[in-house]
Amino acid sequence: MSDPWEKDLSCAEKCSNCDAELSQRDQRILSVYTHEPICMNCKRQEEKRPDYEDVSKGMIAQCIEDTGRPYGDPRGYCFYHFCPYKC
């Protein structure tokens, strides 16, 4: 792993939103709002927010601009806002 966000995501021991403990077997994902690792329960709550679609689109555009990689590239930061990951 070469980027700091990769270490933060893959090794997060707590959800940055609700402080739930995350074991190595638990999936985690980046929040489109805070870009911090969150648990899947918090991700489901995030997806229910009325502005989620607009915030997601804005995050994708900014991420592509920052990294030069499409959001579907598993080597890119954008990917982990939408695809869960385990340690």
Image (spheres, helix red, strand yellow):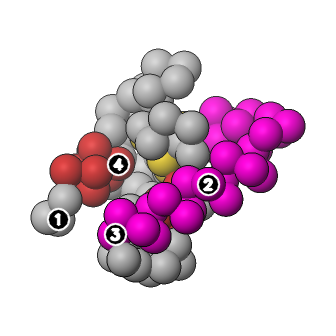
**Residue 65 drawn above or below residue 10:** below
Residue 60 shown left or right of residue 46 in the figure: left
In percent of width and height, residue 12 lies at 33, 38
Residue at 19% over, 50% down: 4
Q: CA distance from mark 4 to mark 1?
A: 11 Å
Between circles 4 and 3, the one closer to the viewer is: 3
- The residue tagged 3 is 67
Instruction: Tell me which amino acid carries mark 1.
Output: Met
Asked if labels 3 and 4 touch by Cβ distance under 8 angstroms, the answer is no
Question: Mark 3, residues whose alpha carbon is within 10 Å: few (<14), some, or many (≥20)?
Answer: few
First along the sequence among labels 2 and 1: 1
Question: Mark 2, residues whose alpha carbon is within 10 Å: few (<14), some, or many (≥20)?
Answer: few
Q: CA distance from mark 4 to mark 3?
A: 17 Å
- The residue tagged 2 is 58
Segment tinted magenta in the rendering: 40-67
Question: Mark 1, residues whose alpha carbon is within 10 Å: few (<14), some, or many (≥20)?
Answer: few
First along the sequence among labels 4 and 3: 4
Instruction: Tell me which amino acid carries mark 3.
Output: Thr
Instruction: Tell me which amino acid carries mark 2.
Output: Gly
- The residue tagged 1 is 1
Q: Dot 2 lies on which element?
A: helix
- Residue sticking out furthest to the top: 19
Please identify the quarter of the rendering in which residue 73 is found: bottom left
In percent of width and height, residue 7 lies at 22, 50
